[in-house]
Amino acid sequence: MRRRAGMSVKLAAAAAMLCGGLVLAIAQGCESETTVYTKRGIFEGMPGVQRGGIDPLQPVEAPNPQMDAEAELAALQTVNPDGSVTLKSPMMRHAIYHLRTQLLAEDGKLLAEQVLSKMTAERFARDGKTVYDAAEELRAQRADVLKFLSRMPNAENTPNVLVTKEGPKLFKLALVNTSAREMKFTEVFIVLEGDQWKVVWVR
C-alpha cells in the first residue's frame, strides 16, 4: 500500500509539472501580436500617423436596432424627380457601404461621381486620367476589394479595425492582426468633404 501511495504521489507531481509546462507554452503562444505600421502615400503601390481609437461617429443606441438599421440605409439614397440618384454618407460607415454597393452595380458611374473623393480625382488627373478611370481600376479588382470590405462589416465600429487620423479630415480604416492575413487590401482611406464622407482609395 505504501509503495502504491508513493507511486501515486510521484505520478501526481509529474502530472502537475507537465500541466505547468503546457500552461506556460500556451501562454507564450497566445501573446499578443506586434503590428508594425509604416507611413506611405495613400496611392503608393497602386494608388505623422496619429494613433488612437478615433470614433467621432459612434451610433446612438436605439430600442429597436434592426428597424433603425433599415431606416438608416433607406435614408442613404434619394431618388430625384428626374430619376437620378443622390447618395448620402454623413457617417464613415456610409461611405464604406456605398463603396461596397457601387462595386456591385452594373456600371461605375455613381462610384466615380458620388463615392470617390475630389482627392482621388485630382490624383488621377495628374496622370492624365479621370475619376472614371479610378472607378474602373477599383471595379477591375472588386473581388479582392469586396473580400477586404467583408472583414469590416460595420466599418469603423468593427473589431480588429484600427482608425487613424492621417490629416485634418482624412482618416484610414485598417484591418489589424489576424483579420489582415492573406489579404491583398487591408486599408481604406476616407475623407470628409463638407458634411459627407468620401472614399479616397484602398491599399
Image (cartoon, rainbow, N blue to C red):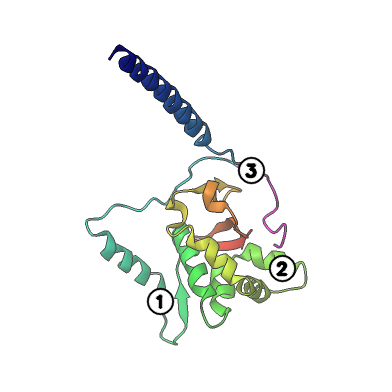
What's the magenta region?
37-49
Contact? badges 2 and 1 (CB < 8 Å):
no
Instruction: Tell which circle, 1 or 3, labels the residue nearer the N-terminal end.
Output: 3
Residue 130 in magenta stretch: no
Q: Tell me if mark 3 has few (under 14), some (14-19) or many (20+) residues whose alpha carbon lies within 10 angstroms of its own.
A: few
What amino acid does circle 3 point to? Answer: Tyr
Using the image as rendered, state which of residue 131 and residue 46 is in the foreground.
46
Quadrant where the C terminus sits is bottom right
What amino acid does circle 2 point to? Answer: Phe
Q: CA distance from mark 1 to mark 3?
A: 39 Å
Instruction: Tell which circle, 2 or 1, labels the residue nearer the N-terminal end.
Output: 1
Q: Determine which residue is flagged by label 1.
A: 78
Q: How many marks?
A: 3
Q: In front: mark 2 or mark 1?
A: 2
The residue sitting at 67% across, 56% down in the picture is 42
The residue sitting at 38% across, 22% down in the picture is 11
Asked if one can make out residue 197 in the rendered structure from this viewpoint, the answer is no
Using the image as rendered, state which of residue 154 and residue 135 is in the foreground.
154
Q: Determine which residue is flagged by label 3.
A: 37
Magenta span: chief secondary structure: loop
Quadrant where the N terminus sits is top left
- Please tell me whether mark 3 sits on a helix, a strand or a loop: loop
